[in-house]
Image (cartoon, coloured by chain):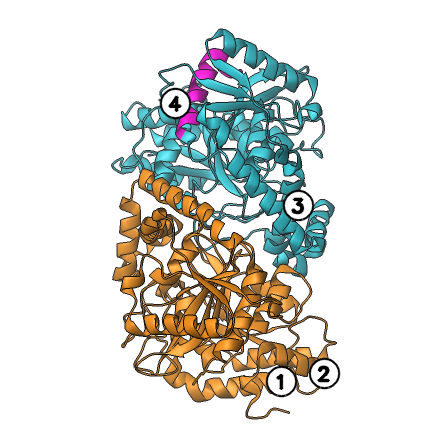
Chain colours: A cyan, B orange
Amino acid sequence: MPGPDIITLSMTEIARRIAAGETTAVAVVEACLARIEAREGDLHAWAFVDPELALEQAHACDQATPEGLLHGVPLGIKDIIDTRDMPTEMGSSIYAGRRPPADAACVALVRGAGAVIMGKTVTTEFAGSHPGPTTNPHNAAHSPGGSSSGSAAAVADFMVPAAFGTQTGSSILRPSAYCGVIGYKPTFGTYNIAGIKAAAQSLDTLGLHVRDLDDIQLLTAVLINRPFEPLKAPAARPRIGVCRTPLWDAAQAETRAALDDAVSRLEQAGAALCDVTLPAAFAGLEEARILINCYERSRHMTNEWRDHRGALSDRLQVVMQTGLDTPYEDYVAAMRLTEDCRQQSDVPFDDLDILLAPCVDGEAPEGLENGGNPRFAGLWTAIRLPALSLPTHTGPNGMPIGIQLVGRYRDDDRLLSAAKWVLEKLGAPSIG
Amino acid sequence: MPGPDIITLSMTEIARRIAAGETTAVAVVEACLARIEAREGDLHAWAFVDPELALEQAHACDQATPEGLLHGVPLGIKDIIDTRDMPTEMGSSIYAGRRPPADAACVALVRGAGAVIMGKTVTTEFAGSHPGPTTNPHNAAHSPGGSSSGSAAAVADFMVPAAFGTQTGSSILRPSAYCGVIGYKPTFGTYNIAGIKAAAQSLDTLGLHVRDLDDIQLLTAVLINRPFEPLKAPAARPRIGVCRTPLWDAAQAETRAALDDAVSRLEQAGAALCDVTLPAAFAGLEEARILINCYERSRHMTNEWRDHRGALSDRLQVVMQTGLDTPYEDYVAAMRLTEDCRQQSDVPFDDLDILLAPCVDGEAPEGLENGGNPRFAGLWTAIRLPALSLPTHTGPNGMPIGIQLVGRYRDDDRLLSAAKWVLEKLGAPSIG
């Protein structure tokens, strides 16, 4: 039966209750819709929700024999990801009302596992820096961060238990940190990205916003096709490298305080910590990432640039023009530096399970225009490592900030297992 | 004025003549259309050609002030690449008549440089192994190879001077070798692939079918935005590693003979040759590539698998089912082996300019059902190196076979320069 608390449950628990007959897909979706109805006027997290369409999917689930892992469970989809039955507008007037002919691969996969596609969440314009209308659920005067603004806000505000986001710089981890949820960017290439609007093809990664680490396991099981097993914390105490990064001076006091607090409490809890200094090449990595982003985006969006330039925001026009003006040789040099950093990043993990690093500059900025700086998560996106933001701390205004955990390339399982340990020791996220 | 020979010119020469006022875009396009009209009944190279639409573009060019490098020059587009004004059917009934809303990035870029989009060339079903109707221009009883069947055949048969192809295994180089044209697969990621139907995202590469190496320079200038300069052969004699690969025993007599002949003539011409043996890991590379291909494709095509399974060929269904049955751990192991080979592949190029390797098993197989084996080009696709097929030899039936030149990662310029030297020494390709 739908209780007032059903919307606070994890996806995994909702799936379990539906499968056990303790609740129904309709009850869950109705509860989420009621929350959206109550809060969307403040939050603006959704680019598209059709309550009838959501309920129709839920009814169909309740009438069918449960087969998939996500049977009847609602999910939000970032609006740069194609859906066959809902518009996909990319946060741009250019694509207003556009109906894609088919689901993106990730949408087809979760649908195949029984998920209810709740609607499309607000993205910044083409997943860039020009903001959408979404506000921060903890304080509507502050940014939710971008580009997966609506996904992070909707999950934080209990409108859905989980949502898809995408990250090219810090577009999953930053809004997750600002809104106080868990953000997960897997190793580059882990989840299939067919049917997702490209921003920068050598960086674009599909990932998740959730409130419970087990939900990452559940969605990963569906997306990469493996059995679902709840996370187990590691048998031995985790070996954690503390990596303040060459950008440490850009961090605000609350981010420094959060990291230092995490270090001291994890040490007390028995983790083996050591400081990790990145090789010299990493000093140029953020600049290289920005160049790669501009160069690749300016090619992906050739069509919009040619036919709809006036409909692009000033910010995006600057990015496009910068990319178009960038000589190919500079792009190759940036790619070489990035690939060099990728290879060098493997070494520390011979002796470490995860890195602990700053996630965002500080609390979510005031006003919606400034969605925050991507640099702290962008470093790790550039070198394709799996990363998590955990909502473990708050700043001086009581707004959430996250810490970032980074894993070895293609060793997401170890990252997630260590993250479970870390989250247990630092306490469950305090949200709302 | 259009002469009988205009269709045999390179893209670069056509562009020069139009720019110099020696001919017109309409004259060129009319000549190509006449060739298509005369030969398409035998060749079936085109999925879509609308003569009026092509002429309309040509007229517009002739009335405009030339600005771009490709002003008035016709180009064929493989039919998995989106075009805003022509259907994009993927070689599948599922997409019959489908009109994409926008150009793929590569199409927008060449259009922006003034190219006339001649039409859509036949692809095998979703760029896989199930053939389209295209025949080999040298003998209609033989396969043109795939998956870029129509692009290779149309260029070989003088219907267009150049065409886009894509390669995930050997889909550019193999049909180029079978049809007797130059095939070019750049370093992975060189040309933007937004708007191209994905086959396997970690391997998919956009490339070219041409009859003249300078046309690669011309199209590259447009696609990556750099000035056009005709190719120069290297100042010093090239250092060429002869790499017969672990697959050498699979090569037919004509491929072995072509390679041996190339070695002996290049040595006589003054090249510095040496044998290169690949590291042990390469023995498993072809198997890893096949696994990666099946796994990634099965995710990209989740939507078609769910909604249109009966419309997929038996072959593609086997690939999809194989991919869906592949455990994620096996995929990761294959990716690790491949990445390991990638890193090891850099070493020989410290002392070498290019590798010379087999390109195809042998001549194009008889019948259209068997499009040939991708293994000889697939090896280098897997490790993302730039590669060329050069139409330097013929087999026992007088059908073309190519040799393959492979360059260092991201050093396409050195590969192309050395290729010019090689092609000069071995003689121009004999076509038709």
Q: Locate residue B8, reporting x and y percent.
A: 53, 85
- Number of callouts in the render? 4
- Same chain under badges 3 and 4? The reply is yes
Label 1 marks a residue whose chain is B
> Badge 3 is on which residue?
A291
Q: Which of A330 and B38 lies nearest the eye of the viewer?
A: A330
Residue carrying label 4? A2
Q: State the CA–CA distance, disc 4 to disc 1.
A: 69 Å
**Which residues are the magenta region?**
A413-432
Tell me, yes or no, whether dots 3 and 2 are on the same chain. Answer: no
Q: Estimate how packed mark 4 is, as few (under 14), some (14 to 19) or many (20 or more) residues with alpha carbons within 10 Å.
A: some
Q: Position of residue B392 (x, y in %)?
A: 44, 76
**Tag in front: 1 or 2:** 2
Q: Are marks 1 and 3 in contact (CB under 8 Å)?
A: no
Q: In screen coordinates, is B398 left or right of A197?
A: left
**Residue topped by disc 2:** B20
Q: Is residue B273 left or right of residue A235?
A: right
For marks 1 and 3, give the CA distance: 40 Å
Residue occupying the point 67% across, 50% down: A330
Q: Quadrant of the N terminus of chain A?
A: top left
- The nearer-to-camera label among 4 and 1 is 1
Front tag of 3 and 4:
3
Tell me whether the residue at label 3 lies in contact with that at label 4, contact meaning CB atoms closer than 8 angstroms: no
| Circle 4: element type | loop
Residue A430 part of the magenta-drawn span: yes
Could you tell me the amino acid type at mark 2? Ala
The three-letter amino acid code for the residue at tag 3 is: Leu
> Is B248 located above or below residue B44 in the figure?
above
Chain to which the residue tagged by mark 2 belongs: B
In the rendered structure, find residue B26 and report the number of the disc placed on it: 1
- Give the Cα distance between marks 3 and 2: 37 Å
